[in-house]
Image: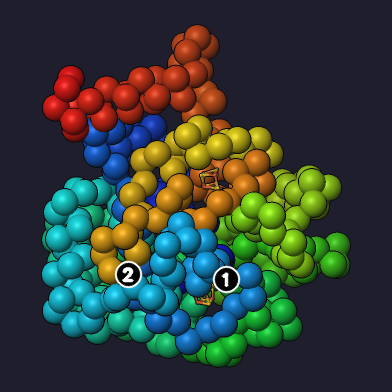
Amino acid sequence: MHARPRATLSLLGESSQGMKNRDLIPAWGRVLKGQKPFLSVEITKECPLHCPGCYAYGSDHLGGATTLRDLSDSKGDDLVAGVLGLVRRYRPLHVSIVGGEPLVRYRELDALLPKLETMGVEVMVVTSAVRPIPEAWAKLANLYIAVSIDGLPAEHDRRRAPATYERILKHVAGHKINIHCTITRQLLQRPDYLREFVTFWSAREETRRIWFSLYTPQEGEVSEERLTPQDRATVLEELRRLGREFPLIEAPERLLKGFQDPPTRPQECMFAQITACVSSDLTTSITPCQFGGRPVCAECGCIASAGLASFAKYKLAGLVQISEIFSLSKRFGDRVAAGTA
Ligand code: SF4
Ligand code: SF4
């Protein structure tokens, strides 16, 4: 999965940014016990793509002491047992399976996904769809598949070969998928670009939902992908318009507000606080969030973080912000976990 385009992916499953209060109650219960209700696992370090702007293979992704390429990764039964071990340890409600490219390990996933279904864990596989998605996965009720698409064919195919549109369309046939597009500066060169993109994917029977994230840069990054403040404002306005017109787009007002006003640091990011991210040796933590390295929170474009950030600003009974209750709960949960509560 995709580091850059992936990353931002919703670890929140079907409800995604439309996350409902009832979805948060069990998650909150886990927080009170000092657990993290969401788990993201880079199940392999291998990926046949070479996307520009991919941060997974960047020197800072794992904090600078090592890189994803230098880590070990497992295969076969070891990988299946290793991921199940993580799930037993963290007891998450939701697991995001990312990479590298998770489909490189499709045989292991064939064994793992039904086991996770039996355990009652919701799973999202985030993929480039560079190879066929196994047919049997369409029957798994706990599974959501997010396919990273970087714009229309001209741009996407250049950036993400060999996972070209032609292959993706072949490989997702028979599945319901969430389209996930990370908006970079390159996609803003034409005013109607996003509209064309949404028109194309809205018409496909495989499309369940269309998600947009905004490109999240790392500290000090100078790149063609990075959005300016004006770009961000323009994009949010366009998503607001498109959201009214195309029902498959996930663009409720509170999500757009979350993009507009992201957390200023990881400690304020509810999403980062409730998600454990583990790399391909199934041991190394990715911090401060799934992006790793030193992401610029003030320019965060993560759809999951934005969804939770706006939720956190709600006031219960018009008095107390949910983020304040969350922060108290987290402190209490940390003390429970440390045995000092
Ligand atoms: S598909 Fe591979 S190269 Fe592209 S962003 Fe994801 S991990 Fe990086
Ligand atoms: S706000 Fe910061 S910590 Fe949270 S997801 Fe975005 S970049 Fe990561």
> Of residues 72 and 121, which is closer to you in this image?
72
> Of residues 171 and 68, which is closer to you in this image?
68
Is ligand 1 within 8 Å of the beta carbon of the residue shown at mark 1?
yes
Residue that carries the numbered disc 1 in the rendered image:
54
Identified at 44% across, 20% down, the residue is: 324
Q: Position of residue 214 (x, y in %)?
A: 65, 55
Q: Secondary structure at mark 2?
A: loop
Q: Position of residue 155 (x, y in %)?
A: 72, 79
Q: Secondary structure at mark 1?
A: loop
Q: Earlier in the sequence, mark 1 or mark 2?
A: 1
Say if mark 1 contacts mark 2, CB within 8 Å: no
Residue type, numbered disc 1: Cys
- Relative height, residue 321 to residue 249 (above, below): above
Residue 276 in view of the camera = yes
Pointer 2: residues within 10 angstroms few (<14), some, or many (20+)?
many
Residue that carries the numbered disc 2 in the rendered image:
280
Q: Position of residue 60 (x, y in %)?
A: 52, 61
